[in-house]
Amino acid sequence: MAELDYFNDTHRMVRDTARRFVEREILPWIDEWEEAGEFPSELFRKAAETGLQGVGHPEAYGGSGENDVFMKMAVSEELMRSTSGGLVAGLGSLDIGLPPVWKWGSDELKERVVPPVLRGEKISALAITEPGGGSDVANLRTRAVRDGDAYIVNGAKTFITSGARADYYTVAVRTGEPGYAGVSLLLMEKDTPGFRVGRNLKKTGWWASDTAELFFEDCRVPAANLIGPENGGFYCIMTNFQMERLMLCTMANMTAQLALEASLEYVQQREAFGRTLSGFQVTRHKLAEMATDVEVSREFTYRVAAKIQAGENCIRDISMAKNFATRVSDRVTYDAVQLHGGMGFMREAVVERLYRDNRILSIGGGTYEIMNEVIARQMGL
Ligand SMILES: Cc1cc2nc3c(=O)[nH]c(=O)nc-3n(C[C@H](O)[C@H](O)[C@H](O)COP(=O)(O)OP(=O)(O)OC[C@H]3O[C@@H](n4cnc5c(N)ncnc54)[C@H](O)[C@@H]3O)c2cc1C
């Protein structure tokens, strides 16, 4: 078992806490929340009280430490046992919104913003993608023009996780010349005049997470809310993507794992032509292939995580892991629905949700094609 190699006793303890949290606070209601298209905001506070929101964030601001990659993975794996990628993405929007603040924000900004988010009192979101494009970050259009001690921000963002109910938005803006050297990060606060949340978008999957449009009209944002150097935001965004992509690998691996587990159970109960589905060799071989794919993908993700933990540059490897994991989860969730027959198409079957939730994983945080671009560039092509 790979787990014996990568996870220590502390990780196992935290994993147990996360598992109990999921069993007690999420699983009894998750179907209801998925249908309602949201989970209660109170869950942010409950997760924070158990310490889960602080995992991966600095101790100085109320977290448990930012450098333990496997602790973060253990928690993410267990949260995925909620069977709802949307809940995990929504509850976890702080993991993409907050790190730029505590890495590159001013001391005042860190002290004001990070602790209330880690206590679950405030919600943090990351806003990079625009209606005009998400992959081409270097050419984003939301404009921030310096005016005395503030920036005047105009533009729009879309597909933002926790976009409707966040309090703090880490927003990518253009402060300078065209291209990547003119991009900065600014912290936008919800009560800023001129800031408006648009539609809460209806989606194929991730129903329990809110995904919104944001509009900025002459928003006056204090210059002190700048995160990192002016025009140095592109580097911050790309660095931030690395952990997001690792978490997306974990989501893909767990989506595939859960689909495999549900299928294994189903084929041993369901009968056709006088035997259980597992009595057909074609079914057994299908499951053997699914299990092999899941195992290999998880192992590779762990290996990449270990390299990140050791401080190695993993831009190429993390991109490979994301593409491999999502290809596996695409195949495994498809096959899991197939093995369930008509029941696989029914909302009451967990594989139906896994199949829908899975679809975003090769799009969000850098598409499959962009990952291949990154890999090719790292290969010198
Ligand atoms: C549910 C959900 C939640 C999200 N949450 C967030 C969030 O919290 N914050 C945030 O900022 N964004 C978020 N996103 C946005 C997500 O990161 C983007 O959708 C993604 O980066 C792709 O951008 P795009 O949708 O604009 O597609 P586009 O960039 O328009 O791409 C369209 C297609 O063209 C391909 N393509 C683009 N450029 C190239 C190229 N150079 N070579 C080859 N092919 C290319 C892409 O791979 C894709 O297949 C979310 C999206 C969804 C659906």
Image: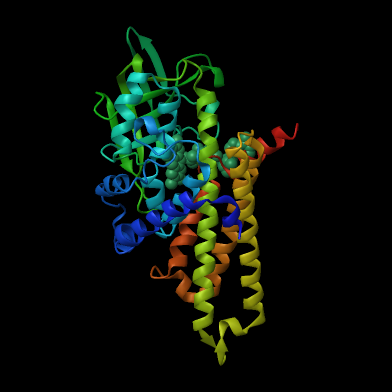
Residue drawn at 75 percent across, 31 percent down: 380
Work out whether 171 lies above or below 199. above
Q: Is residue 218 above or below residue 92?
A: above
Instruction: Name above or below for residue 228 compared with residue 88.
Output: above
Return the residue nearer the eye: 252 or 212.
252
Farthest top residue in view: 148
Q: Quadrant of the C terminus?
A: top right
Residue 214 spot, x, y in % from top left: 34, 33
Residue 280 figure quarter: bottom right
Q: Residue at x 32, y 58 (%)?
A: 26
The N terminus, quarter of image: bottom right
> Furthest residue to the front?
9
Among all residues in the image, which is located at the extreme bottom?
Answer: 274
In this rendering, is residue 170 above or below 291? above
Q: Is residue 97 left or right of residue 259?
A: left
Q: Residue at x 45, y 32 (%)?
A: 128
Residue 323 visible in the current orientation? no
Most foreground residue, 264 or 14: 14
